[in-house]
Image (tube, rainbow, N blue to C red):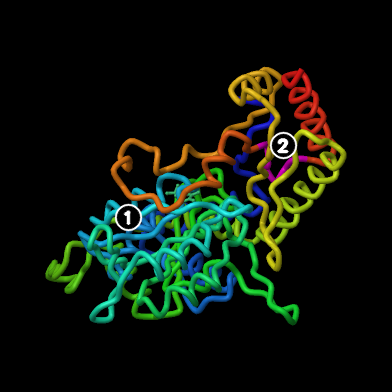
Amino acid sequence: MSKFPLSVPVMHGKEARYLQECVESGWVSSAGPWVDRFEKEFAKAIGMPSAVSVTSGTAALHLALMIAGVRPGDEVLVPTVTFIATVNAVRYAGAEPVFFDCDDFLNIDSEKIRLFLAGECESSGGATFNRKSGKRIAAVLPVHVFGHPARIEEIVTLAEPFNVAVIEDATESLGSLVLGPNGESRSTGTYGHSACFSFNGNKIITTGGGGMIVSRDLAVMKRAKYLSTQAKDDELFFVHDEVGYNYRLTSLQAALGIGQLEALTKIVERKRAIHSRYVKNFSNFREASLIAEPPRTRSNHWMNTLRIAEGARLDLRALIGRLGQRGIQTRPIWKLNHEQKPYLANQGYRIEKATALYPRLLSIPSTSSLTDSEVDQISSELMKTITELLK
Ligand SMILES: *Cc1c(COP(=O)(O)O)cnc(C)c1O
C-alpha cells in the first residue's frame, strides 16, 4: 500500500466501544436497537425526518430508482462523470441511461438537461418521452461528484414540469451543504424525491460497507424498508406479495456507523482544511490547480482533484507511476461511462467538456488523517513530478 493512499477509513475513538457493546448485547444481525439508532442519528445529521439503511450505496440507488417508479423500458438521465455504480443501478431497474456532460465542477450540466428536456423530448399524458428513442424519461440521477454539491435546486425545478423524478446520488457528499441567500444552509440529499448515501470504506464515513436512503416522503421510506427486507406482508406466515431484496444493514455495521457519524463534523472540517492547504500550496504553480467547490455551496471535499493546465502535455500514466514509486497514490477520475462497454449503445447528449477534461484530471490523497506537513510533502512531490514530466 502507498504511504499516502487516496482515501482510507479513519477511526475516531468510539467505534470499538460501540462494536464491543453490540457484540456483548448479542444483537449482531439485523434485529435489535443498533440499526434503528444509526438510521435516526443519520437522519438527524442531515436534517431529514427519517432514513432507511441498506447494504450499500448501490443497493440504495437500486431501491430508490424502483420506488421512484423507474420501470423496464424507461430512461434515466445520468452524468457520464460518476462511478459506474450510479449507472449500473439504472440497468438493475431494467431502464437505460442517457448520458450527460459535466460542468466545471465535474457535476452533471444542468443547462444541458434543460435543453434536452425542452428540445429533444415531448410530453403526453403527464409523462415525458425522448423523441429519439420513444422511451419515457422516468428520472434524473444527479451525483454530487467528489462531494461538491451539484446544481440540485435548479435540477429539481426544471425536472418538475416534465414529471421527471429527481434522485440524488449523494454517496460522496455526506456533510456537504447548499447555501441560501440569507446564510441558511441545507444538506445535499434533502432535495430530491429521494437520495442515496454510501458507507463504503473510502467514503466520508464508513460502516465497512453500507448505504442509506432518505426521503421526506414517508411512503417512500416505508417502501424502502419493505423492499430491503424481502417484502414481508405477513411475517409470521411468510407472505410476500412482491419480489423483495435482502438489502439490510447489520447491527455490527450500524454500531461502527454510529461511532463514525459522531465524528462527521470533525471529519468534514479536516477534509476542508486539507483542501485549503492544497489550494494554498498550488497557488503559484501554473501547471495544475485544484477543482474548487461550486459557488454558494460548502463541499465536504471528500476527494481532491488536480486539474492539469490546458495545453500541458503530460502522460497521466507516467505521472501516476512515478508518484506511486514515491509513495503517493493518485488515480485518473473514472473512465467516462458513455465509453464503458456495457453502455456503448446508449445515447449521450452533447458530451464535450467531460471528454476534454478527462485526460487532465487526477485524484490525489485526501484521507482525513493527513497532517498539514504531510499535505505539504505530497504537494511538493506532486509539483516536482509534474515539472519533471513536462520537461
Ligand atoms: C461509492 C459510490 C457509489 C456506490 O456506493 P457503494 O456503497 O460502494 O455501493 C455510487 N455512486 C457513487 C458516485 C459512488 O462514489
Residue at image point 59% right, 41% down: 357
The answer to whether mark 1 is within 8 Å of ligand 1 is no
Nearer the observer, 42 or 181: 181
Dot label at residue 59: none
Give the quarter of the image for residue 150.
bottom right
**Figure check: 41 above or below 184:** above
Q: Position of residue 66 (x, y in %)?
A: 29, 65
Amino acid on which disc 2 is placed:
Ala
Asked whether residue 147 is in view, the answer is: yes
Is 193 within the magenta? no
Residues under numbered marks 2 and 1 in contact, where contact means CB atoms less than 8 Å apart: no
**Figure check: 347 above or below 286:** below
The answer for how far apart the CA atoms under marks 2 and 1 are is 34 Å
Q: Nearer the viewer, mark 2 or mark 1?
A: 2
Neighbour tally class for label 2: few under 14, some 14-19, many 20 plus, Cα within 10 Å? some
Neighbour tally class for label 1: few under 14, some 14-19, many 20 plus, Cα within 10 Å? many
Start-end of magenta stretch:
364-370
Amino acid on which disc 1 is placed:
Val
Dot label at residue 309: 2
Q: Position of residue 89 (x, y in %)?
A: 34, 53
Which residue does the numbered mark 1 point to in the structure image? 90
Nearer the observer, 359 or 213: 359
**Figure check: 190 above or below 387:** below
